[in-house]
Image: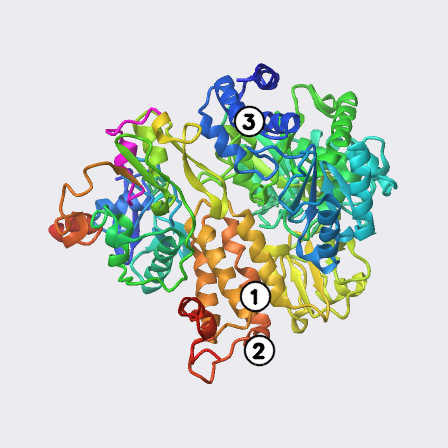
Amino acid sequence: MSNTITFMIDGVEIEGKPGQTIMQAADEAGIYIPRLCAFKGLSPYGACRVCTVMVNGRPQAACTQPVAPGTVVENDTERLQHLRGNIVEMMFVEGNHYCMFCEKSGNCELQAMAYRFGIAAPKYPYLFPERDVDASHPDILIDRNRCILCGRCIRASSDLDGKNVFQFVGRGKDKQIAVNAEARLADTDIDVTDQAVSSCPVGAILKKRVGYAVPIGERLYDHKPIGSDIEAARTAGS
Amino acid sequence: MSGTLENTVKDICRSHSNDRTRMMDIVREVQARFKCVSSEAMDVIAAAVGTHRVEVESVVSFYTYLSEKPKGKVVIRLCNDIIDKMHGVERVAQAFSDALGIKFGETTPDGTISLEYTPCIGLCDQAPAALINDVPVTDLHRSIARQIVADLKKHMDPKRLVHRLGDGNNAHELVQSMVVNNIRTEGPMVLSPVNRGEAIKQALAISPVEVIRAVKTARLRGRGGAGFPTGMKWEFTRAATGEEKYVICNADEGEPGTFKDRVILTERPDRVFAGMTIAGYAIGAKTGIVYLRGEYAYLRPYLEHVLERRRNDGLLGQNVGGKEGFNFDIVIQMGAGAYICGEETALISSCEGLRGDPKNRPPFPAQKGYLDCPTVVNNVETLCCVTKILERGPGAFNEYGSQGSAGTKLLSISGDCKLPGVYELPFGIKLSEVLKQAGAEDAIAVQVGGASGAMVAPNEFERTICFDDLATGGAIMVFGPERNVLEVADYFLDFFIEESCGYCTPCRVGNVLLKERLDRILAGHGEPADLDYLQDLGETIKTTSRCGLGQTSPNPVLTTLKNFRSAYEALVKERDDGLQPSFDLSEAVGDAEQIAGHKSVHAD
Ligand SMILES: Cc1cc2nc3c(=O)[nH]c(=O)nc-3n(C[C@H](O)[C@H](O)[C@H](O)COP(=O)(O)O)c2cc1C
Ligand code: SF4
Ligand code: FES
Ligand code: FES
């Protein structure tokens, strides 16, 4: 038994393994902690903060915080859901997200997260930033208007594709995703089959000409809320 | 590709061993040589050090001292922080702008002079101040600004703008600066005269474990802001396994209103370096790094000289202080204009040649810091305390201060006071007493702890300066009767928006939203519900941000909401016409009126 770490999430006893994050252990136990920058197979990043939990009363990102014996983790509380909802709203007003005519609608994790949190319209004012679209590549489109700066493409390109197509440039509110070329995605060594392309949670990196291959209404989050796959494990088990 | 650029950049890379972790030195040098790190240069650097071009671009675009577009041969960086604003920087700015015929953010058409604003450059006690390339110019007013431009047009040599020299080492031949120290009280610990070599002798006479015990017995806590017990930090780092270990001195001093490390580095650098050496002995490190903010580059030649003197005296190098097998040396790493690099993990990223993004914790620097090795990061002043503790013993140290906060604290006092400057005072002193000493008895508000600290109202001036009450890294900014605390808070938000690294959502977006709403209130368009909105938004940023910047950036708003609520309430009112205060009817129908070609019957 020395290889399990026992701790609590919302009063439920969880068994984690050494080296696991709270999020990984929760996933295995069928407890969903909301997330946008964390992605299976990619190193933890801690950027979106949607996964904020309380660990012994202190806020921590569940995707980067390691499990520790005896800790008390709060996840599904009114306060935390409120804070997370605020963060999701920030992402909406920070970019230019027009779900009604976005190809990604129904498959978009940001949109799905808003539905899960019951957000119809953000209380914050839209910031309407000016951002670029890069359609230079024959098979792939970058629309920075929809980028939520989660860094998944960066990590997927370097960790999974063995390339280095993406990186952030600038800082603060001017931070944006850039490509490994003077300006254009077409001048990089990206390929449409790269994991970097499919790792984007929103409609910021899209494959061209397949946008409506799956009709609206039949998409990933059209019928089941985001996170229900993880929660299914628990419902099945209990 | 132009041959000279390629060859010069290659040479620069080679002089830094084509080492990717030396990226900061490389890009700083390229910037100094070509006034930019151009797209071409990025390609050359990437190839030379074996990285990707976008990684170089990522670094260059992060730091304000670096730019892809060419800057002038001379860059005038005028500090427009709150203290400078209070001292009339706007008129100075106008004078610079008129004399040069350009706006801020521009370069003269002949490409010679650029004009920029910069946040606090650590000269608040002699504001308005500017840096002209590396040269500080202080106590500016309009006619001086005009004269500076006229002189620069003649000789383009910022060094020749220095017509008077400051006191102490500011006048040293390797500094030659007009900066003055403004030391108002020279306490018994940090600013007292240096007894060179003594502390190291005492430290080397006992074991590293005993050194750590002495620091713990003295109850020393970090002076950089967080107040972590220094001995404990050293113990963790000593216990951690790693081939190499490092000591880093945090000399980034970027918190607006803080300038005490500048004075220590000018007058007592030996004490800082001794502290680093003792830390190295205690944790088992061979290398110390001073991370010096770009704004203090004018001190670098002097600091290098002091390091060289210590090497000559056997206080650095092989067998330090005659101790067989104890080898320790110190290098200086320059920053390049980023407040976030004062945060210890961002500082480490920067030393590693990366963007100044903070790192995820755990692991903490004590376990995995610089180049993944166990690393101690300590503030300049903390290291001075270490030296004094070893020199005089823990008892002589914690005889000053209070139980939870042993020793003295350097305070940087600026703003509406008669005697701005640096004060070394025992912990536990009342704020009212500090204000009395500085000649600031008519203060209506005091920002304790810089932009990220708390705005304190007169009914709390009897509180004490210490870790358990009013904690501060050293900044005390005083605001007199004619100041508007909400405008001060608004300015601080500008600062945090500018300086956020942008890694996490709440800090990157939340501060922009806080400012939007505070601006709305200041413009008279606020409504009572906006106060709850600010509170909720501020708490969200504070609770969910990834590092100390976002965790403290809402403080100016949250503490003014608490301590100066009436100032907000006076500005937010329900409207009697039932419309939202933010709604301006005539503005809303303006476009329609223009199209229709006549005035709306409603909009009068
Ligand atoms: C945004 C931010 C800026 C900081 N700037 C500084 C700084 O300029 N100097 C400093 O010593 N500590 C600064 N700190 C605190 C450091 O992270 C760290 O706690 C300190 O250097 C540790 O040294 P100490 O224990 O000796 O205080 C900053 C922290 C944050 C969050
Ligand atoms: S492009 Fe997509 S994957 Fe990359 S940072 Fe933006 S939202 Fe994340
Ligand atoms: S999922 Fe943890 S911070 Fe984004
Ligand atoms: S130097 Fe201008 S505020 Fe510090």
| Residue range highlighted in magenta | A188-204
Majority secondary structure of the magenta segment? loop
Task: Mark 2 or mark 3: name the one nearer the start of the chain.
Answer: 3
Chain of the residue under label 2: B
Q: Secondary structure at mark 3?
A: helix
For label 1, the residue is B559
Image mark for residue B32: none
Task: Look at the numbered disc 1 and say if its residue's Cβ is closer than 8 Å to ligand 1.
Answer: no
Establish if B232 lies above or below B527.
Answer: above
Give the amino acid at mark 2. Answer: Ala
For label 3, the residue is B23
Q: Residue at x 47, y 39 (%)?
A: B359
Query: Foreground: A65 or B513?
Result: B513
- Outermost residue on the bottom side: it is B576
For label 2, the residue is B570
- Of labels 2 and 3, the one closer to you: 2
Disc 2/disc 3 C-alpha distance (Å):
51 Å
Q: Position of residue A202 (x, y in %)?
A: 29, 45
Mark 1: few/some/many CA within 10 Å (<14, 14-19, 20+): some
Give the amino acid at mark 3. Answer: Met
> Does residue B211 belong to the magenta stretch?
no
**Which quadrant would residue B65 be assigned to in this image?**
top right
Q: Residue at x 66, y 22 (%)?
A: B326
